């Protein structure tokens, strides 16, 4: 796969940087302009990584890590990052939930101006499930990988309860309720479901007897 870079083109855009493919990397790189196709040498500035403070929330626990992020990178709320803290020898995939820059919360910011990144760990998550049962409702939890997909209409088991998903509330407020809708666990706020009751011996016998007597 060809690496891309944003630099000025002496032929069509000498003042505004535009997209280029890197044809020859190294000390004397050669690139090709996306706009006009011109091939020309350029200078690629080496960006030093910025060591950034990251507060990671995992279930009900928060802890602080420090990770290197390439200079010039723009960070947004809801970005997915890999936090690699070499000092703590820990690696966590996270979703950015908040950014602090200059003492205020922002929606996006260049990494050089970011003081703190808050993020939610997504390597493992606890899915919270509300199940409608005969006499009301109950809540259970299911521990899964953040990439595990829950599907509307499918049956699952948690804490010895069988249930069928009716709808899924996504973080941010939207719902998925069409049969077959898939949502990775890391994006889920809450799952709503109905209990799947297993027929006991007496229920099965009653049903069989009713059919035999022509009631069904």
Image (cartoon, rainbow, N blue to C red):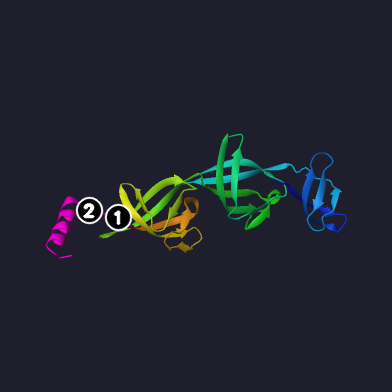
**Residue at 68% over, 49% down:** 111
- Left or right of 129 in this view: 14: right
Q: Position of residue 97 (x, y in %)?
A: 56, 53
Name the element at disc 1. Answer: loop
Whether residue 211 is in magenta: the answer is yes
170 left or right of 85? left
**What residue is drawn where x is 17% and y is 50%?**
201
Q: Where residue 178 appears, x then y in whole percent?
A: 43, 63
How crowded is the residue under tag 1: few (<14 C-alpha within 10 Å), some, or many (20+)? some
Q: Give the residue displayed 38% in from the left and 58% down from the top.
A: 153
Specify whether 63 is left or right of 34.
Answer: left
Q: CA distance from mark 2 to mark 1?
A: 10 Å
Q: How many marks?
A: 2
Pick the residue in front: 14 or 207: 207
Image-based side of 156 in relation to 182, left or right: left
Q: Which residue is mark 1?
A: 196
**Highlighted magenta segment, given as a residue range:** 194-216
Please name the residue that numbered disc 2 is placed on.
199
């Amino acid at each position: 796969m060809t690496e891309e870079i944003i630099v000025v083109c002496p032929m069509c855009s000498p003042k505004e940087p535009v997209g280029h493919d890197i044809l020859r990397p190294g000390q004397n790189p050669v690139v090709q302009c996306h706009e006009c196709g011109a091939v020309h040498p350029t200078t690629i500035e080496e960006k030093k990584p910025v060591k950034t403070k990251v507060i990671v929330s995992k279930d009900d626990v928060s802890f602080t890590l420090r990770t290197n992020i390439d200079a010039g990178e723009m960070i947004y709320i809801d970005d997915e990052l890999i936090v690699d803290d070499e000092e703590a020898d820990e690696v966590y995939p996270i979703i950015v939930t908040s950014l602090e820059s200059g003492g205020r919360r922002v929606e996006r910011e260049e990494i050089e101006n970011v003081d703190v990144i808050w993020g939610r760990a997504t390597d493992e998550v606890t899915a919270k499930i509300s199940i409608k049962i005969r006499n009301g409702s109950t809540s259970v939890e299911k521990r899964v990988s953040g990439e595990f997909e829950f599907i509307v209409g499918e049956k699952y088991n948690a804490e010895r309860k069988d249930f069928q998903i009716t709808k899924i509330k996504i973080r941010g407020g939207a719902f998925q309720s069409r049969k077959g809708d898939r949502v990775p666990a890391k994006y889920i706020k809450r799952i709503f479901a109905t209990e799947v009751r297993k027929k006991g011996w007496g229920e099965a016998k009653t049903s069989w007897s009713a059919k035999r007597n022509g009631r069904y």
